[in-house]
Image (cartoon, helix red, strand yellow):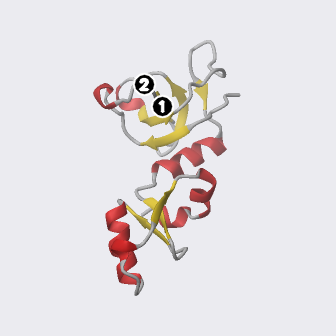
């Protein structure tokens, strides 16, 4: 079983080599033959139409690759990766403890101003990056 640590993001496309940050680790995900909506394997490189997406990690996967140089994705992990890839927004927390999902901090401030009598430009805001906290509010992050 593979130990996946430091997951930064999952997308449902190939991230071009020229856009890849050298300090991060990129793994491509092969789609399932029987259900194209889910990933089947984690690999260094997936050819053509078999690509499901790309997983970006801050740490390399140290073990779990089989003799054919891929890792079989479990049902649970496949569903989790699909959910993570569906995130289209970031989560922002304002000083009033209000949570707002938006594509950018600026957009979050506009939404905050619409929902609150506080002046958004002066409001303290932080992006929530803790994965456990993000999972609690998953319903806000997907369209």
Q: Image height check: is 33 above or below 37?
A: above
Of all residues, the one furthest to the right in this rendering is 1
Q: Image height check: is 59 above or below 115?
A: above
Q: Image height check: is 19 above or below 65?
A: below
Of all residues, the one furthest to the left in this rendering is 18
Residue at horizontal 48 percent and vertical 32 percent from the top:
29
Helix, strand or loop for disc 2: loop
Q: Is residue 110 left or right of residue 3?
A: left
Residue at horizontal 45 percent and vertical 26 percent from the top:
23
Where is residue 134? Give x, y as percent: 56, 57
Nearer-the-camera pick, 36 or 16: 16
Q: Residues within 10 Å of mark 2 (few under 14, many from 20)?
A: some
Q: Residues within 10 Å of mark 1 (few under 14, many from 20)?
A: many
Residue at horizontal 52 percent and vertical 38 percent from the top:
39
Which mark is drawn over residue 46?
A: 2
Nearer-the-camera pick, 79 or 87: 87
Helix, strand or loop for disc 1: strand
Q: Which residue is mark 1?
A: 30
Q: Quadrant of the C terminus?
A: bottom left
- Res. 88 image quadrant: bottom left
Nearer-the-camera pick, 52 or 117: 117
User: Which sits earlier in the primary sequence, circle 1 or circle 2?
Assistant: 1
Where is residue 118? Give x, y as percent: 41, 83
Label 1 – label 2 distance at C-alpha: 6 Å
Where is residue 87? Give x, y as percent: 45, 55
Where is residue 127? Give x, y as percent: 47, 58
- Res. 46 image quadrant: top left
């Amino acid at each position: 079983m593979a130990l996946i640590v430091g997951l930064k993001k999952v997308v449902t496309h190939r991230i071009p080599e020229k856009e890849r940050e050298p300090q991060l680790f990129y793994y491509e995900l092969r789609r399932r033959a029987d259900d194209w909506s889910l990933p089947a394997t984690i690999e260094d490189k997936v050819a053509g139409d078999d690509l499901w997406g790309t997983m970006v990690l801050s740490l390399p996967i140290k073990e779990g690759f089989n003799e054919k140089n891929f890792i079989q994705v479990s049902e649970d992990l496949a569903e989790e990766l699909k959910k993570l890839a569906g995130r289209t927004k970031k989560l922002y927390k304002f000083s009033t403890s209000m949570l707002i999902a938006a594509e950018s901090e600026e957009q979050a401030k506009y939404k905050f101003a619409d929902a609150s009598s506080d002046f958004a430009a002066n409001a303290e805001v932080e992006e929530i990056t803790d994965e456990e906290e993000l999972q609690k509010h998953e319903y806000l992050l997907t369209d």
